[in-house]
Image: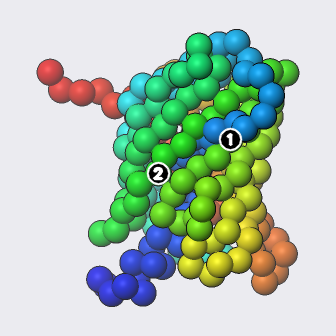
Amino acid sequence: MTTRHSFQQALRGCRNVALAAALVVATGATGALAAGDELLSRLEGEWIGQGTVRMGPASPPERIYCKIANKLVSGGAAIEQNGRCAVGTNSGSLKGKISARGDGKYEGSLDSPQTAGPASLAGEATDNRIVLQAQFIDRFSRKPSLSIIQLMVGDGGAYRLVSNTLNPESGKHFETSDILFKPNKKKK
């Protein structure tokens, strides 16, 4: 389907995927930055992601593909991200920055086609996992929304993003995305 309605549905479903893929894309507004952050440094580079996304609590999973570029800034205490994710024949760009605030705390914001204005991200890390809460206004429903995003950084040069979104009707969270990112190995 190529109607405006189906495009909006695809973007709505990508909302949390974009947020998950953009986990690395927050920008902190307060406090001093931490010195170079070990977890963020492991996310630097170009990445290809593949996984699944659900457009709503009753929707079946769909395949999603992402291409993301992460750049360390602020002496390694923050990472800027630019990228694009696609579901079926539709795609959307995302851009943001995540900043380490010290003591395992992270915060920032995300601009994506699925949010009306930037999403606010805040959370913390333990071991090799960053867990963030994403608060945003859904561009299509114009309602406040909340997602929990987990970024699991592996030792083998990959990372996994899983997001769960609050269903406003039931009050329960449902898994909206699960994406595995691997380094983009360019052909020479």
Up-down relation of residue 12 to residue 159 (above or below): below
> In the image, what residue occupies the spot 34% across and 68% down?
90
Up-down relation of residue 120 to residue 42 (above or below): below
Viewer can see residue 47:
yes
Q: Nearer the viewer, residue 32 or 153?
A: 32
> In the image, what residue occupies the spot 48% across and 37% down?
81
Asked if the residue at tag 2 contacts the one at tag 1, i.e. Cβ–Cβ closer than 8 Å, the answer is no
Amino acid residing under circle 2: Leu
Task: Say the numbered circle drawn on residue 94.
Answer: 2
Quadrant placement of the C terminus: top left
Amino acid residing under circle 1: Gly
> In the image, what residue occupies the spot 65% across and 13% down?
36
Question: Horizontal placement of 5 versus 101: left or right?
Answer: left
**Real-space CA distance between mark 1 and mark 2, rounded to the nearest whole angstrom:** 14 Å
Mark 2, secondary structure of its residue: strand
Mark 1, secondary structure of its residue: strand
Up-down relation of residue 114 to residue 82 (above or below): below
> In the image, what residue occupies the spot 36% across and 62% down?
91
Measured as percent of width and height from the top left, residue 83 is found at 41, 45
Measured as percent of width and height from the top left, residue 22 is found at 55, 46
Lower position in the chain sequence, tag 1 or tag 2? 2
Question: What residue occupies the far left of the structure in this picture?
Answer: 188
Q: Which residue is mark 1?
A: 108
10 Å neighbourhood of mark 2: few (<14), some, or many (≥20)?
many
Which quadrant would residue 108 be assigned to in this image? Answer: top right
